[in-house]
Image: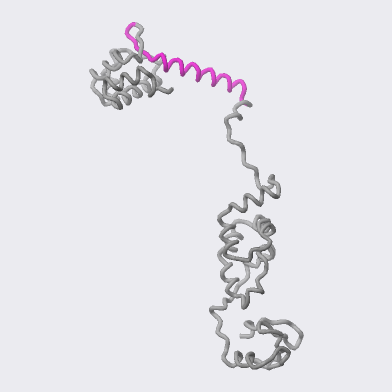
Amino acid sequence: MQARNDIDVVKMRDRMGNMRAYGTYWCIIEILTESKRHALKLSDVPIIALQIGESAEYVETLIKTSGLFEFAGEYFYSPRLISVLKELEKLIQHYTNNPDQLTLFEEPKKKSLEQMSEQELITAIADSEDFKKLWNTYAKFVGKKEAMLAWNSLTKLERAEAISNVHNYLNSLSDKKYQMNLSKWLINKRFNDSYETQTKKQMPERLSLILQLSQVGDSFVWNGKKYTKISNYEVKDELGNFVLINNLY
């Protein structure tokens, strides 16, 4: 009901106090809607006024002079309200008989992840704030599509664990070059690993001196075991196993 722009409503508001009259009018309409046959007796005005919180004189004047109500003997009613309710009744009856047409008013259902194409899935994940946070924190910007698909395969709990443990993994690396692609880190669920961060490690001074003085291919003994220096980041033990230097202490 576009009542606020109705010429009679505008005149009523101008003559009887703008929003005071408008509010009173709608209170009367609400009471009429709830009443039988959507009509009330003029003798009920004092009760209506009490419900609204206005004087009976003000309410009666509005009903009789606004041009928005009509009269049938001792009753008054709103033609506009009757018209709207009749249309509403028709609609209810129509959609009761044709329930399938109600889908016209429903919002399009979102596809489940299983129903999405790979591209739709990637777009949806790319908009995920949690994935954005992990991607930017991990900061190895290769294989984003594979990382998204790996992320999608995780449970909510696993995603939370990945986000909470990613800093520990990154800080555990002695060199950025050892950082695996995010997709591999997620697929292998390496976020479940326990990481000792580099910031907590303090290389023993003697080991530091040994490594500084030795060349690649040189052998040395540390904690009773013999190692061969392979690079500035790893060594090889007597069994031929490669060991990160930060794992020696």
Provide residue 145's location: percent of width, then percent of height: 68, 57
Residue 65 relative to residue 222: left or right? left
Give the answer, above or below, for where 53 lies relative to 173: above
Q: Quadrant of residue 33?
A: top left
The structure residue drawn at horizontal position 46% and vertical position 15%, both measured from the top left corner, is 83
The structure residue drawn at horizontal position 57% and vertical position 30%, both measured from the top left corner, is 105
The structure residue drawn at horizontal position 66% and vertical position 57%, both measured from the top left corner, is 148
Give the answer, above or below, for where 157 lies relative to 50: below
Give the answer, above or below, for where 143 lies relative to 168: above
Residue 52 relative to residue 233: left or right? left
Provide residue 49's location: percent of width, then percent of height: 27, 21
Q: Quadrant of residue 171?
A: bottom right
In the current view of this chain or complex, which residue is farthest to the right?
A: 240
Q: Is residue 86 magenta?
A: yes
Camera-side residue of 142 and 102 = 142
Residue range highlighted in magenta: 73-99
**Image colouring:** one colour
Name the quarter where the N terminus is drawn: top left
In the current view of this chain or complex, which residue is farthest to the top?
A: 73
Provide residue 67's location: percent of width, then percent of height: 33, 13
Q: Is residue 122 magenta?
A: no
For the stretch drawn in magenta, the main secondary structure is: helix
Q: Quadrant of residue 109?
A: top right
Provide residue 120's location: percent of width, then percent of height: 67, 47
Camera-side residue of 185 and 92 = 185
